[in-house]
Amino acid sequence: MVAKYECSAEIVAWDERQADEIARIFLAAVHAIPDRFYSRSERLAWAPAVYSSTHWRQRLQEYQTRVIRFGSAYCAFLSYQPRSDDTEQIPVPGLYIDCLYVDPVWQRQGLGGRLLQYAINQATNGHYHSCFSDVSRAARSLFENFGFQWHHTNQLVRNGVELQNDRMRYRLAQQTQKELDS
C-alpha cells in the first residue's frame, strides 16, 4: 500500500505523450474492480487490452483531461467536457465527466476525490448548472459522498456484453422555469 501523498501529488493537464499511462491506468483500474460490482467477463468487455495508447490519444482529444502525478508516477486521470444535461425537463448547460480512473496502487488515498472536486470546481467556475456522469457501480459511493444523486440506470452493450452504470448528477444551481425560458 502506498502512503497518503495527497498534498504532494499534483493535478496537471494531460499531454498526448501520456497516452500509454492513461491506457495503463484505465486497464488496471477496471480489471481491479471486485466481482461483486462487475464479473470478469463484464470487465473484459469494458476494458479489453485492445484499448491502446492510440485509442486514448484520439478519444481524449474531445475532452479536457487532467492527470494526477506524484513525482514521475501517473496515478489517476479525469476527462470532462461541457455538455447539455438532459436529465432536466429542459436541458441545461452542464459539465459531463467522461472518465475518472485511479491506478489500483493509488486507490483509497483520496486521489479520486481530488479529481472529482476538481471537476465540480471547474463546473462551478464555468457557471454550469450541473456536473454529471455515467458512473460505474464501483465508483457510485465516491460520487454519492460528494453529493451526486442517482438519476437513472443505463443499460449498455460493450463488445457483446450487457453492462449497467448509473447516471449521477450534482446540481450546482437552482433555476426557475422563468430563468430557463429567458
Image: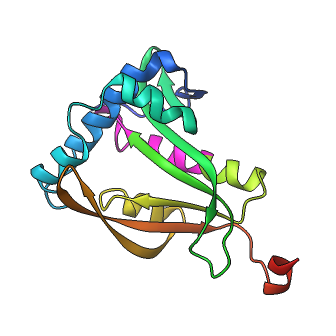
Give above or below for 149 relative to 66. Answer: below
Residue at 51% from the left image edge and 20% from the top image edge: 16
Residue 14 position, x and y percent, is 55, 26
Q: Left or right: where does residue 90 sit relative to residue 19?
A: right
Q: Residue furthest right?
A: 182
Q: Along the line of sight, which residue is nearer the eye, 88 or 148? A: 88
Q: Residue furthest front?
A: 160
Q: Is residue 114 on the magenta stretch?
A: yes
Main structural element of the magenta stretch: helix, strand or loop?
helix
Residue at 35% from the left image edge and 34% from the top image edge: 106
Q: Left or right: where does residue 73 sit relative to residue 125?
A: left
Q: Is residue 89 on the magenta stretch?
A: no
Residue at 20% from the left image edge and 38% from the top image edge: 48
Residue 166 quadrant? bottom left
Q: Which residues are magenta?
A: 102-118
Residue 3 position, x and y percent, is 37, 31
Residue 110 position, x and y percent, is 45, 44
